[in-house]
Amino acid sequence: MEKKNTKSTILTGTLIAGALLTFSVNADARPSTRVLGSGADVRTEIIELNANSSSDKLFELKCGEKPATAKKADTKTKDAKAAEAKCGEGKCGSDDKKAAAVKKDSKTNAKAAEAKCGEGKCGSDTKKDTKASTSKKAKTSEAKCGEGKCGAE
Amino acid sequence: MLYSAKTYDSQQRLSRWVRTGENADVPGTTAEGLKQYRRLFRNNINNTLTQAYPISLEVLSNEQWNKMVDGFYANHDAQTPHVWKLPFEFYQFARESDYAQKYGFPFLNDLLYFEWLEIDVYTMPNKYPEPFKENGDAMNDLIEVNREYSLERLEYPVHLYAAKESLNHKGNYFLLTYRTPKDFEVKFLDMPPLHVLFFEKISNERLTASQIIDQLLVQNNEIPKEQLAQNILGFIQTMMEEKVFLGFSENYLN
């Protein structure tokens, strides 16, 4: 049996008309759906962009261009090897992605699936402490009450 | 067993102290003990929220974040007994309290919601597809859609840019958050309005790509049909690769 879902659209008539008009008029502006990746990848990239106040767009570095963090590192070390990277040698921005993969965490696993009251590191008062534990390794660990350091201010 | 009036009063005083930090004269307690009690409880809530909203935590100053958490803790009567659902109520609280305007960060509601979506989709109940086959005609066969998704419109592209940079790109952005079958990984897609239109018609109205194209040509006959079909074919391929489209429906229409 044919099933029809009555779910309402999130598009307005104006948006639909605009999309169709753009398609019919502008041959260069063909729309494309962009794969952003997993939650952990996107989160890590966005945090990095925010940390560097970068104006870069997610996963859209130009060929040969490096993420803001890499630029900073290069300026400091003046690493000649990095400057020699050529277009076609691997996917652009892949360095950044690798870094993201290393940092990859499981926000949803840690939090959503098994979180119970009392889990997590207890006793860290300042946001700084939490921030470090959130954005780095500690964030992914499944700390349980009694396992963390309690009572430290 | 019912509480005695005295116990109830003590409990109310204690919870008032724990939530607000305002002296509530809880009988039989010591000042130092109460202080630790409040600190531990407050940290539990803060930990849950910081894990749910790492990007917002990065964007806001310590003071701004703590003010929001304190406001939430003191003033919001949680409706859920599940700690992991609390971040959604935090988002609702932040939106209703209009912290976006208070802090001069118009993107804040979108950012919090974007972060919540990952948890929401990850924890959504299983939705099973109808029987489907892997091979078929992308343009003329009905497509079976992975039902474990959430499609949302964002005003600020906080999923594409640093939050403050997103202010320079205000517009209409469509974010598809979905959970992949088998490994249950949450993934994101940024979709243009045209593809949202096709996605919704395929998913909700159960139309084939060619039926949708025919509909659109009736509305606007200046659309180059061949190019549109090519574009949509590419879109369907991407969606198949990403497991948003699972395959082709096995029903009498195919």
Image (tube, rainbow, N blue to C red):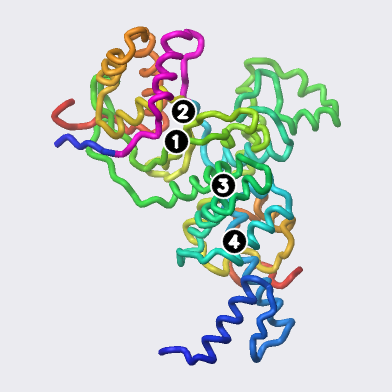
Specify whether residue B134 is painted magenta.
no
Kind of residue at disc 2: Met
Badge 4 sits on which subunit? Answer: B
On the image, numbered disc 2 is attached to which residue? B191
Discs 3 and 2 share one subunit: yes
Q: Residue at x 71, y 25 (%)?
A: A66
Kind of residue at disc 4: Phe
In what element is the residue under mark 2?
A: strand
- Label 4 to label 1, Cα distance in Å? 29 Å
**Mark 4, mark 1: which one is toward the viewer?**
4
Residue A18: which disc? none
Residue B72: which disc? 4
Badge 1 sits on which subunit? Answer: B
Badge 3 sits on which subunit? Answer: B
In magenta, the rendered stretch is A7-33
Q: Pointers 4 and 1 in contact (CB under 8 A)?
A: no
Rendered location of residue A39, percent (x, y): 53, 41
